[in-house]
Each structure stands twice: as structure tokens, then as C-alpha cells.
């Protein structure tokens, strides 16, 4: 079996701002040119199918925005998520790029809607038993990148031994001081619209 053929196709389903591109960049660095990735949302030559129809693709991205993505029997899934409060603070910055007003009222409206969707996303993709699934939590990746990336490598290529030395080397070289896009965990209390009562309500709604 060739090294290329031993890398399986995995469907990525991720909550926004949970380190998807960090993982994709790492996997491409680890596996090299034989690793095929499709971002779907901006790729011009994407087949727009799920699962991907292109044999050269090993990893695809999907946020399941409308929560209608079907769980397919036998399909391997890599699920990425993170704690809700830091994710919604981070995602609000992207939301503002659409020209939305940067106000506390807009943040609250955005965050309450996101909390309901987060609860449904986690209950669908993270909670309970699900075969052929690997779950990576952003906070764990930040804390122990070598361990979490090694788990991902094994999931994509279960018949290959994980080269832990290469994993560690990439973590140290590629992540380095900038951590390849991984930032230290956000302190939500520092957010300009932080309100203890509101954030407690948001956390409760997200974790239902």
C-alpha cells in the first residue's frame, strides 16, 4: 500500500473558530504533497458534494451552519469545537466584518442566537456515542498540541505508525512563538461588552 493510499478521507465538521485551519495546516505539513485538502467554502474547483467525490482529497471542511448535514454510516468524521464563550467573542469579530454595528446590543443579539445553535451543534456532533469519530477540543489542542495532533495523524492514517518525532518537530518549528495561528486562550472578562449576568445566561443556554 502506498503512503498516499494509506491516508483515508475524513469529513471535518467544526464549530467556527475552533482551530480547523490550524489542524489542516499541520496535516499538510506532516503528510506532505500527498495530503489533499478542500476548504469547500472558497475552493473554486470544489465538487460541492458530501462526502467529497474527489479521490485526491483527504480532508474537507464543513461548519454545518444549518445543522442539516447527515451522519452517514461508515463515514469518518473529525469534530472540532471549543468552549462557547471564547468562541462567540472571537466569532463576533468576524461578524462585524459584514458591516454590522459594533455595539453591546448587537453582540447580545448575535450571542444569544449563537448559543442556541451551539447547543444543537454539540448535542448533534459531540455528545453521545458515534462510530468513526475523532473529537478535538480547541482548548486541549492549545494545551497539548503534540498529543492532539498525533491523535489526528493516527485517525487519518491508522495503518501507519505515528512519527512522534516529526509531530514534535512540526509543533516546535511550525507553531513556534506564533503557534501557527493558535492564540492563548481568551479571557472573556476582558471583552469590551462583558457582563457577568449576560455571560452566565449565554453559558447556560449553550450548555443545555
Image (cartoon, grey):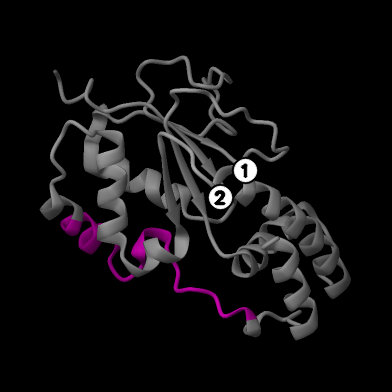
Quarter containing the N terminus: top left
What is the x, y in percent for residue 102? 81, 69
Rendered position, 112 above or below 98: below
Residue occupying the far front of the picture: 129
Q: Quick check: marks 2 and 1 in contact, CB under 8 Å?
A: yes
Q: Please state if 82 lies on the left or on the right of 32 as rendered.
A: right
Q: Residue at point 23% right, 36% down? A: 32
For mark 2, does the 10 Å Cα neighbourhood hold few (<14), some (14 to 19), or many (20 or more) residues?
few
Spatial separation of the CA atoms under disc 2 and disc 1: 7 Å
Task: Identify the residue at image location x=38%, y=24%.
Answer: 57
Q: Which mark is residue 111?
A: none
Q: Which residues are magenta?
A: 168-188
Crowd tier of the residue under label 1, counting other residues whose Cα lies within 10 Å: few below 14, some 14–19, many 20 or above: few
Is residue 50 on the magenta stretch? Answer: no
Residue 69 versus residue 57: which sits nearer the camera?
Answer: 69
* Percent x, y of residue 199: 73, 76
Q: Which residue appears farthest toward the right when viewing the image? A: 105
Element at badge 2?
loop
**Residue 54 location in percent, x, y?**
43, 16
25, 67: nearer the viewer = 67
**Toward which corner of the image does residue 110 lie, by quadrant?**
bottom right
Quarter of the image where the C terminus is located: bottom right
- The residue that mark 2 highlights is 127
What is the quadrant of residue 177 in the picture? Answer: bottom left
- Mark 1 highlights which residue? 124
Q: Position of residue 183 (x, y in %)?
A: 45, 69
Amino acid at each position: 500500500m502506498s503512503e498516499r493510499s494509506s491516508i483515508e478521507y475524513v469529513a471535518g465538521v467544526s464549530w467556527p473558530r475552533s482551530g480547523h485551519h490550524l489542524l489542516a495546516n499541520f496535516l499538510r505539513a506532516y503528510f506532505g504533497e500527498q495530503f489533499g485538502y478542500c476548504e469547500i467554502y472558497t475552493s473554486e474547483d470544489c465538487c460541492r458534494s458530501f462526502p467529497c467525490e474527489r479521490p485526491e482529497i483527504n480532508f474537507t471542511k464543513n461548519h454545518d451552519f444549518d445543522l442539516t448535514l447527515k451522519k452517514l454510516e461508515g463515514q469518518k468524521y473529525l469534530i472540532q469545537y471549543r468552549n462557547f464563550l471564547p468562541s462567540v467573542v472571537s466569532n463576533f469579530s468576524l461578524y462585524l466584518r459584514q458591516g454590522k454595528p459594533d455595539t453591546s446590543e448587537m453582540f447580545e443579539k448575535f450571542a444569544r442566537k449563537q448559543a442556541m445553535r451551539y447547543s444543537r451543534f454539540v448535542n448533534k456532533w459531540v455528545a453521545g456515542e458515534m462510530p468513526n469519530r475523532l473529537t478535538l477540543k480547541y482548548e486541549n489542542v492549545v494545551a497539548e498540541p503534540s498529543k492532539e495532533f498525533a491523535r489526528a495523524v493516527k485517525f487519518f492514517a491508522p495503518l501507519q505508525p505515528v512519527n512522534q518525532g516529526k509531530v514534535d518537530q512540526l509543533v516546535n518549528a511550525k507553531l513556534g512563538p506564533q503557534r501557527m495561528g493558535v492564540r492563548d486562550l481568551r479571557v472573556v472578562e476582558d471583552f469590551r461588552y462583558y457582563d457577568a449576568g449576560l455571560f452566565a445566561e449565554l453559558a447556560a443556554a449553550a450548555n443545555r
